[in-house]
Amino acid sequence: MERKWWTLLLVSIATFMLLLDVTVVNVALPDIQRELHASLSSLQWVVDAYSLMLAAFLLTAGSLGDRLGRRRVFTIGFGIFTFASFLCGISNDPTLLNLARGLQGIGGAGMFATSLALIGQEFQGKDRATAFGVWGAVVGGAVAVGPLVGGVITESLGWEWIFFVNVPIGITAMVLTERKIVNVFAKDPEPIDVPGLVTFSLALFLLIFGLIRGNPEGWGSPLILACLIGSAVLLSAFVAIELRSKYPMLDLSLFRKSAFNGVSAVAFGLSAGMFAMFLYLTIYMQGVLDFSPLEAGLRFLPLTVLGFIVAPISGALSNRIPIRVLLGSGLAVVGVGLLLMHGVSPDSGWTTLLGGFLVAGIGIGITNPGIGQAAIAVVPVEKSGMGSGINTTFRQVGIATGVASLGAVFQSQVDSKLAGLLPNAPSGLAEAVSSGGSRAAAAFAPPAQRPEVVHAAKVAFVSGFNEILLIGAILSFVGAALGFALVRTSDFVATSPEPEAAEPVTA
């Protein structure tokens, strides 16, 4: 098999594992919550610790790939990810699990930041559109089978095994990567931007921490104000450092290109508006509708399988239809899907979501391949690692801030609704409803009062759920408008069929 097809295969495996770990974990969250006695904020951190560390290190990993070799950084990231998966599986409390998830994110940054650049260095012309169509299908496929795989593994083996399965796959993929992929690197490697890395990572951490802990601690509390103000100060410092740095990890001149801003907005909008919603969709299905992990996974299939089917079609069409049309229309379709999910009532069944699932799945499939292709088309080939890293940073920051921000709105709405329905609600009831739905609320009342409490919990939950579905739709429509207005093919950089420097491929 040709080297470029080995590259596509191994990059696809890595991307599949990375995204599978998001969707698989979503289905297992209620089991994790019960076994480890985790709060809503702890459950949010299971998702956000991974997304946050992934986002924090993507820019650095992408720049390191350009400096040291994309294969080398890809393999190192794979190793860290595989080891962290093992640590996640042996975790026996939420803190250890979240720390291991953060380490997974660091490893994932090395894999994800170089994935698009590895494809870009091997494929040109029509083959490139095909390759990105396959990559987009893999993204959709990971989302498609994730809930189902998570449900099967969680019910048959336990939630720990959703992490353990990564170990043999990761080891095999690392060996093949070293043997089959060429190590392309810049001719004149630049030093690591340590001040940029530190300020950017700390700013993201303080922002996500402040958003997640805002409701429990109080938005006016000194801790939360310090986190949010500190995040703004550090982000400002990061921009100042990058403007003055001789070797910035984020080349701010890229933001002068409207296409770069447009594709970044689309990546953020899709993640914050749709992918961040999976946590709350999962809690609704398992905590309110009382489905098992497997039953919930099966009901996600209409959304996710359509994303898998549509993605390669969208990738193939990118040679005929302007990418901005695919990005703008695809994300707008996602927004319509979220609007169709809006309007859930306490007595609704899961089919209330079905129309929205179908439409959103089509929109995801249309959007994903174009994001990947445009991300590296707007940067010179020697900076494709940076371009890939920046794009995936916007994806992961979108997920992390989306989960945290939607969670803050959701919990506030649940608190407010329960206060009106049950003025003398037991302490901890609102937290239980937010993290485990109405099923968890039943534990907070004696049998005689349980029906009343469960009904109030359902009313409060769907009230908050409908609120964040509307916000997700708005985020998607804004991202769609920006993508359609800003992405122009005139900003794309012509690619060269020859890599700038390479080590020979090992046999």
Image (tube, rainbow, N blue to C red):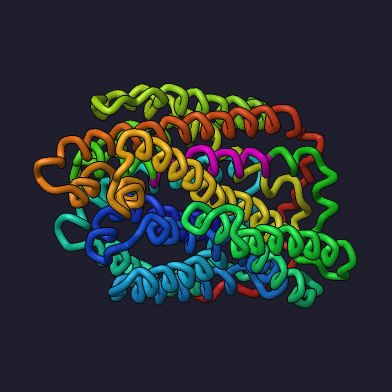
- Magenta segment range? 263-279
Residue 27 in view in this figure: no
Q: Position of residue 118 (x, y in %)?
A: 60, 59
Q: Position of residue 325 (x, y in %)?
A: 65, 26
Question: Between 133 and 193, which is closer to the camera in this rendering?
Answer: 193
Of the pair 271 and 448, the residue shown nearer to us: 448
Q: Is residue 132 left or right of residue 493?
A: left
Horizontally, residue 281 falls left or right of residue 221, namely: left
Q: Which residue is rendered at x = 25% and y = 42% of the image?
A: 438
412, above or below 222, in the image: above
**Residue 113 position (above or below residue 77):** above
Q: Which of the 4 image quadrants contains residue 447?
A: top left
Report the front residue among 370 and 109. Answer: 109
Q: Residue 271 in magenta?
A: yes
Please tell me whether residue 116 belongs to the stretch shown in magenta: no
**Residue at x 43% of width, y 74% of height:** 175
417 to the left or right of 242: left
Location of residue 227 in the rendering, given as x and y in whole percent from the top left corner: 64, 63
In this orientation, does residue 86 appear?
yes
